[in-house]
């Protein structure tokens, strides 16, 4: 599937700021399931861009605006070709997770983090779910993915960044980042290496993964990848209770959200920003020229009032 993506973030400060330094992680990776065809970033006010690959293999575009400014707009545009992952061969037993070489290779994705710090009750629940599905690693991961998808109800603004995953589970509500963190935590709690994935989802409904038409307006998405001995990394989408497919576009992965935030920055000055972020994805026919996606002006975003729920949702991205 050929997809054209436009990821846009606009900041409107209520007072001038003297300087801002920012890191953008919005460039899709090229891997066995997808190929990046083109990518470009534009910033207003204009700024010099320094690009590099971070420790986790994600492209980072760093830029600083030294002059005084009250608005900042960042637009990342990409074209990517995606396909469904290959079918799994015979899955290994749970006992294979104890192989010393495997444990050493995936050590960083077995430990709790700020967003994936589980408790004993969660670990016990994960173990029960895995055992109910037999001794198959892929079956255990699939069962945990299904559990998260049914245990949480999708609700924007119900959680905050940094909220303990145990509290998210107790509430039973969250957004895609919470689904991914919970699934990662459950996997790690029983010795299955898992990593958090940031990306885009071509879907008219983030909760169901359904597609309607050739153009969707969404937010960034998150899912997980679990490491399975002899099979590699298996991607699953707990929000939609399905395997990752051609409608998913991966940006990067890490231990949790903090390793792959789409946009992170600091600024100097008294101004408080209002943030407006959006993603447009267009499905392209084979041979069709790249499209020009709709990009609302920064002034329009500044003037448009937003509800408290919308603001909370933007802070989650």
Image (spheres, rainbow, N blue to C red):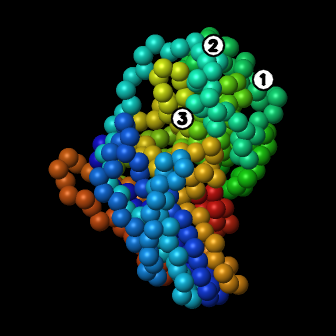
Residue 154 rendering spot, x and y as whole percentages? 63, 45
Q: Which residue is mark 3?
A: 225
- CA–CA distance in space, label 3 to label 2: 19 Å
- On the image, the x and y values in percent for residue 256 come to 63, 46
- Quarter of the image with the N terminus is top left
> Is residue 204 left or right of 137 when viewed as pictured?
left
Q: Looking at the image, how many numbered discs can be counted on the residues?
A: 3
Q: Is residue 147 above or below residue 248?
A: above
Residue 53 in view, yes or no: yes
Q: How far separated are the C-alphas under marks 2 and 1? A: 17 Å
Q: Could one spot residue 152 in this view of the protein?
A: no
Query: Is the C terminus in the top left, top right, bottom left or bottom right quadrant?
Result: bottom right
Tell me which numbered mark, 3 or 2, is placed earlier along the sequence. Answer: 2
Q: Nearer the viewer, residue 5 or 99?
A: 99
For the residue pair 219 and 184, the one nearer the viewer reads as: 184
How many residues crowd mark 3 within 10 Å: few (<14), some (14–19), many (20+)?
many
Label located before the other in sequence (2 or 1): 2
- 236 vs 173, left or right, is left
Above or below residue 50? Residue 245 is above
Residue 100 image offset from top left, x and y in percent: 63, 21
Mark 2 — residue?
95
Residue 145 coordinates in the image, percent (x, y): 59, 30
- Sequence-earlier tag: 1 or 3: 1
- Extreme residue in the left direction: 287
Mark 1 = which residue? 124
Marks 1/3: CA distance?
A: 21 Å
What residue lies at 44% left-to-right and 76% top-to-bottom?
Answer: 48
């Amino acid at each position: 599937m050929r997809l054209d993506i436009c990821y846009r973030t606009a900041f409107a400060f209520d007072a001038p700021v003297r300087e801002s330094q920012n890191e953008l992680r919005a460039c899709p990776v090229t891997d066995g399931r997808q190929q990046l065809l083109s990518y470009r970033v534009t910033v207003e006010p204009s700024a010099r861009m320094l690009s590099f690959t971070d420790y986790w293999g994600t492209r980072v575009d760093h830029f600083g605006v030294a002059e005084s400014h009250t608005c900042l707009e960042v637009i990342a545009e990409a074209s990517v070709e995606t396909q469904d992952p290959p079918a799994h061969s015979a899955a290994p037993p749970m006992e294979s997770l104890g192989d010393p070489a495997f444990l050493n290779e995936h050590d960083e994705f077995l430990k709790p983090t700020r967003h994936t710090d589980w408790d004993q009750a969660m670990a016990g629940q994960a173990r029960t779910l895995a055992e109910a599905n037999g001794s198959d690693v892929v079956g255990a991961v699939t069962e945990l993915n299904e559990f998260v998808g049914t245990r949480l109800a999708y609700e924007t603004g119900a959680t905050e960044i940094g909220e303990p995953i145990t509290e998210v589970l107790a509430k039973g509500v969250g957004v895609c980042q919470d689904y991914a963190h919970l699934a990662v935590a459950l996997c790690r709690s029983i010795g299955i290496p898992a990593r958090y994935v940031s990306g885009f989802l071509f879907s008219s409904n983030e909760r169901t993964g359904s597609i309607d038409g050739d153009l969707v307006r969404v937010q960034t998405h998150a899912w997980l990848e679990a490491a399975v001995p002899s099979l590699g990394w298996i991607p699953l989408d707990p929000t939609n209770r399905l395997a990752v497919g051609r409608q998913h576009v991966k940006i990067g992965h890490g231990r949790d959200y903090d390793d792959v935030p789409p946009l992170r920055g600091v600024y100097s000055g008294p101004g408080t920003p209002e943030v407006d972020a959006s993603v447009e994805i267009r499905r392209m026919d084979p041979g069709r020229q790249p499209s020009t996606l709709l990009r609302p002006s920064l002034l329009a975003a500044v003037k448009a009032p937003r509800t408290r729920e919308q603001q909370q949702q933007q802070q989650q991205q």
